């Protein structure tokens, strides 16, 4: 029997007390592992969200909100300022418009439905400030919304210098037939959404009238999005010319050279463009969105520290009590030739034994509860940020790609997968050892101070 | 040979210094069985602590085979206790959660004996002091007072010490058992040529030792 085996034997000397100590350590160490897992998982998610937020910045006319109006289009001077801003690598400009029956002979493939019709009428009323007499009562000039003729849905025309920007998921636009157009040119060509093409029997090579000009169908695209597939994509310069909006754009998506420069570029653009444009980036939105996750990470760290202190205190108090109880025994061991190193070694082994038993059970406990605990922490916290940060800025086109991407990130915030990595496990074991060392240090100091003559004199 | 010269030990308390030992001089030859007698508080146990390097004298010298143990460092004192001294206590002071065999093996470990040899040596010692094999695996609580004191003696002799210091070795035993323990110590003293210094109240026992020192108020009077 040596120092180690005596320490182990002593640790199990009082089953009830040892059991109580192990139980408390189990809870403490289980909590440490759970909090470490939660922190690690949340940190991984934060990194993932930030990484997926990309390097793109959306610039829209101030106050613009889809086709609900608000703001003037961005001018060519503003586009130049954007392009000249440091760290801007490239830009995609978009000009969106809606063709009415007076602009084209095409029939929209969209069904407004009661909600869409209400929105359309409301928009029309507020735009024109006109009132329409009702069909049933011509004697009054009071407008009503219940018995007017339902408006015809418009056809969205997107002029862009990059047709892929219209793709809903940021990937290349899926052409089901024909070929793409030169978006940087000014030809009278168009890509037509599959829904609109079907509705109007358009095929590659067909022509249609828009803004008084004849446009040739170059290709048919499909995005699996009914709204997108009911639109038309043309070169930016073509739409600007057809709509008499030379140099104007309704949204710009700027690519920054590095994700590290997104924040400073946004600041720079806000300074340059002032209050004439709304500037947003996924990175900014993601930063705001992950704030709750960061608070969970902080909370988890506090939990780790608290549980470590609790565990160390438990073992410290237990070992101090044990040393005080066995003061006489320590005196005897020293009297018969036991050195401080051997006696301290025995008690450190005793503390380590209790800690290791507590760790094994605690780590197993932690493995079981870490998943539900992480999920619970994340779901209760992230839901609030999801609702507060989700909004819809700007008309379709490239801006919609940004917004859709962000909404996807936001909706995935609660999907944090807790996983116990080797690093997390090693950290938990390291903390456990720290607990044992802290818990043994003061008792060891007590042991070193015990003088056998004093102990034996009090017999 | 053990020689004590002008040994003084003072304790400091709230009411002032207390002189426990006052200019003690004594000499014990190798292999002698000496006894120290005196009333309670006369300084017997304090003197034994000094001889066993459990405590440091205020002044004076304690020489064992020419080495002044009062001048040893803490580590040297520990080594001295492990290899040169054997202690037998009135209340045995066996480690309660170790068996009789393990208690003896513990002293052998501190004495530096290789682990493989400890068990055989401990069994031999316990057999020598009359502890049967079945009793050797019992914890102290399951042994009688006499048996515990025998185990204590076996532990004291484990490392073949030069000196065995016994503090009232029979004080907690009935007279018959006490006599047996004394006879055992006497026999071992002769067979192993070990110096034994025993503190006792029992004048009969003291009368049977080779030399007796009487302590009174911290001074040796005889």
Image (tube, coloured by chain):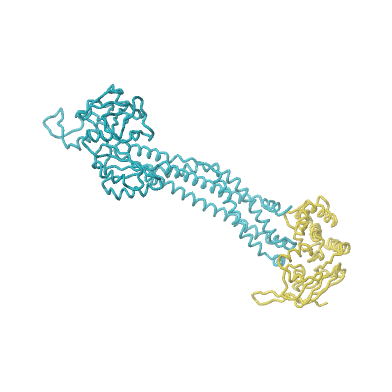
Chain colours: A cyan, B yellow
Locate residue B25: give its quadrant.
bottom right
Using the image as rendered, state which of residue A82 and residue A72 is in the foreground.
A82
Residue A18 vs residue A101: left or right? Answer: right
Using the image as rendered, state which of residue A77 and residue A37 is in the foreground.
A77
Pinpoint residue B179: horizontal percent, then vertical percent: 85, 63
Q: Quadrant of the C terminus of chain B?
A: bottom right
Q: Residue at x 64, y 57 (%)?
A: A322
Q: Residue at x 83, y 73 (%)?
A: B27
Using the image as rendered, state which of residue A53 and residue A242 is in the foreground.
A242
Q: Residue at x 22, y 34 (%)?
A: A243
Q: Quadrant of the N terminus of chain B?
A: bottom right
Pinpoint residue A327: horizontal percent, then vertical percent: 68, 61
Pinpoint residue B219: horizontal percent, then vertical percent: 78, 77
* The furthest residue to the left: A139
Using the image as rendered, state which of residue A423 and residue A305 is in the foreground.
A423
Location of residue B26 with respect to A396 vertically, above or below: below
Location of residue A56 with respect to B156 vertically, above or below: above
Location of residue B5 with respect to A267 vertically, above or below: below
Locate residue A309: give its quadrant.
bottom right
Location of residue B25 with respect to A248 vertically, above or below: below
Number of marks in the image?
0
Pinpoint residue A413: horizontal percent, then vertical percent: 42, 41
Residue A141 vs residue A443: left or right? Answer: left
């Amino acid at each position: 029997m040596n120092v180690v085996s005596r320490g182990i034997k002593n640790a199990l000397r009082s089953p009830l007390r040892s059991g109580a100590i192990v139980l408390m350590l189990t809870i403490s160490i289980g909590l440490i592992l759970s909090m470490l897992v939660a922190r690690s998982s949340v940190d991984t998610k934060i990194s993932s969200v930030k990484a997926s937020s990309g390097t793109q910045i959306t610039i829209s006319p101030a106050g613009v909100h889809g086709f609900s109006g608000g703001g003037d289009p961005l001018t060519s001077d503003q586009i130049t300022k954007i392009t000249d801003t440091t760290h801007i690598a490239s830009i995609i400009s978009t000009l969106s418009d809606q063709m009415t029956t007076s602009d084209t002979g095409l029939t929209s493939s969209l069904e407004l439905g009661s909600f869409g019709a209400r929105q359309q009428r409301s928009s029309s009323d507020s735009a024109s400030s006109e009132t329409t007499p009702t069909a049933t009562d011509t004697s009054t000039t009071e407008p009503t919304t219940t018995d007017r003729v339902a408006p015809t849905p418009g056809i969205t025309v997107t002029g862009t210098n990059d047709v892929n920007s219209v793709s809903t998921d940021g990937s290349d636009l899926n052409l089901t037939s024909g070929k793409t157009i030169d978006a940087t040119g000014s030809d009278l060509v168009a890509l037509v959404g599959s829904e609109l093409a079907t509705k109007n029997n358009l095929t590659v090579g067909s022509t249609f009238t828009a803004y008084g000009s004849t446009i040739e169908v170059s290709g048919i695209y499909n995005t699996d999005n009914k709204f997108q597939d009911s639109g038309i994509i043309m070169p930016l310069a073509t739409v600007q010319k057809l709509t008499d909006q030379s140099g104007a754009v309704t949204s710009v998506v700027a690519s920054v050279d590095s994700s590290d420069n997104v924040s400073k570029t946004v600041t720079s653009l806000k300074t340059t463009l002032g209050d004439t444009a709304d500037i947003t980036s996924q990175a900014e939105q993601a930063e705001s969105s992950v704030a709750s996750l960061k608070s969970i990470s902080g909370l988890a760290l506090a939990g780790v520290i608290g549980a470590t202190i609790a565990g160390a205190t438990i073992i410290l108090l237990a070992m101090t009590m044990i040393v005080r109880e066995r003061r006489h025994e320590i005196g005897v061991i020293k009297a018969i030739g036991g050195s401080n190193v051997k006696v301290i070694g025995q008690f450190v082994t005793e503390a380590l034994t209790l800690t290791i038993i507590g760790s094994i059970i605690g780590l197993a406990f932690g493995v079981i509860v870490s998943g539900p605990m992480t999920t619970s922490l994340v779901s209760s916290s992230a839901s609030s940020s999801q609702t507060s940060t989700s909004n819809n800025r700007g008309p379709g086109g490239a801006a919609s790609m940004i917004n859709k991407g962000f909404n996807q990130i936001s909706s995935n915030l609660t999907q944090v997968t807790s996983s116990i990595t080797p690093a997390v496990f090693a950290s938990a074991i390291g903390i456990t050892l720290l607990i044992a060392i802290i818990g043994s240090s003061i008792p060891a100091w007590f042991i070193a101070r015990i003088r056998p003559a004093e102990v034996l004199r009090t017999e | 040979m053990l020689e004590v010269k002008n040994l003084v030990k003072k304790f400091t308390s709230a009411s002032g210094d207390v002189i426990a030992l006052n200019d003690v001089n004594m000499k014990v030859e190798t292999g002698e069985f000496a006894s120290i007698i005196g009333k309670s508080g006369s300084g017997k146990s304090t003197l034994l602590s000094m001889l066993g390097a459990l405590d440091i004298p205020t002044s004076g010298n304690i020489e064992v085979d020419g080495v002044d143990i009062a001048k040893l460092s803490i580590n040297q004192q520990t080594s001295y206790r492990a290899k040169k001294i054997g202690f037998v206590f009135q209340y045995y002071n066996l480690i309660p959660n170790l068996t009789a065999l393990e208690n003896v093996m513990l002293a052998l470990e501190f004495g530096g004996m290789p682990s493989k040899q400890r068990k055989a040596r401990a069994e031999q010692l316990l057999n020598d002091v009359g502890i049967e094999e079945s009793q050797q695996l019992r914890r102290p609580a399951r042994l009688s007072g006499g048996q515990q004191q025998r185990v204590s003696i076996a532990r004291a002799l484990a490392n073949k010490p030069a000196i065995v210091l016994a503090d009232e070795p029979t004080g907690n035993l009935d007279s018959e058992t006490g006599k047996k323990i004394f006879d055992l110590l006497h026999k071992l003293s002769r067979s192993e040529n070990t110096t034994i210094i025993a503190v006792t109240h029992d004048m009969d026992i003291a009368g049977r030792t080779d030399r007796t020192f009487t302590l009174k108020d911290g001074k040796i009077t005889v």
